[in-house]
Amino acid sequence: MRSLLFVPGDRPDRMDKALSCGADALILDLEDSVLPDAKPAARAAVAASLAKPRAMPVFVRVNPLGVITDEDLTAIVPHKPDGIVLPKAEGGTSVAELDARLTRLGDTNARILPICTETAKAVFALGSYGGVSARLCGLTWGAEDLPAAIGAVTSRLSDGSFTPPYETLRALTLFGAHAAGVAAIETVFPAIKDEAGLSAYAARGRRDGFSGMLAIHPAQVPLINAAFTPSQAERDWACRVVEAFAQNPGAGAIQLDGRMLDAPHLKQAQSILAQA
């Protein structure tokens, strides 16, 4: 999944429009974008949307683990969401708990995508997601809730880049996801009118090892998809690398275009072709 687009759960009109925006998945939101008094109506709207035929995966961001989570799950599980986004996850134990709640409600298929950096406790559990649940399909992170939780002024510098503590969180999420053998999903880019900034941000994410990104506006989706799709030049290079190794099956290293290539380069080439 290159692009996962958030849609407020209390805006059914936007849900229908989002289906045609080109995102690889939707995230219907019952958490931060929905005020407490509006949550019952939002659950009904999300359930109604899930009941319709869908041509793409549809996730639901529920509220953090607690009583209200069960209210969310009870409303949506009968309509078979493709996945659940779990905010304020605090390690593998949170995923295991959500897995158990889904199973008790009769769901055996929904995947789980935790947002894993929204509390101070969560930071120290970023290496604990591996092997906890077959439902785990990725890890993503956020840079908005944690500053509020710890009394920080902001997570960003004046140019929009992250301050050092939050760059650290980004890196730990990236490595935590790969250690768990699941996709690393980059967090949102809040400046929805800054197309150049978004393109650069998404390209940086793919460069560093993220395989997709969260979106908060439909206009962001094409730019994110483009950034996380290998270019033709990358595909051509990958094909040549795979072919070169195939022609030299006994070689641990080969020379191509004046460069020495070995097993990591072959793995990189195979990954590019898989993405393409």
Image (tube, grey):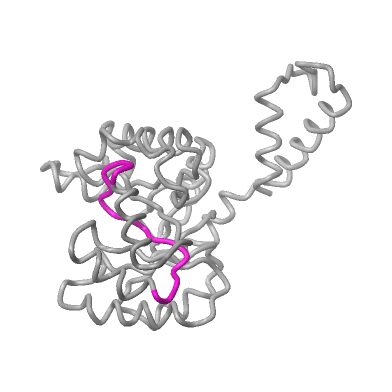
Answer left or right for 247 relative to 42.
Answer: right
- Position in image of residue 153 (x %, y %): 14, 43
The residue stretch that appears in magenta: 78-93
- Tell me: residue 204, above or below residue 16: above
Pick the quarter of the image with the N terminus. bottom right
Asked whether 76 or 224 is in front, the reply is 76
Q: Examine the image and state in which quarter residue 7 appears.
A: bottom left
Image spot of residue 266 (x, y percent): 71, 28
Residue at image x 71%, y 43%? 273
**What percent of the width, then of the height, locates residue 221?**
50, 62
Q: Is residue 258 left or right of residue 13?
A: right
Q: Nearer the viewer, residue 10 or 226?
A: 10
For the residue pair 14 and 102, the one nearer the viewer reads as 102
x, y percentage for residue 231? Answer: 68, 46
Tell me which residue sits at (70%, 37%) in the image. 270
Question: In the picture shown, does residue 109 fall above or below 252?
Answer: below
Q: Is residue 211 magenta?
A: no
- What is the tally of numbered marks visible in this picture? 0
Q: Residue at x 53, y 42 (%)?
A: 206
Q: Is residue 87 magenta?
A: yes
- Which quadrant would residue 104 be assigned to in this image? bottom left
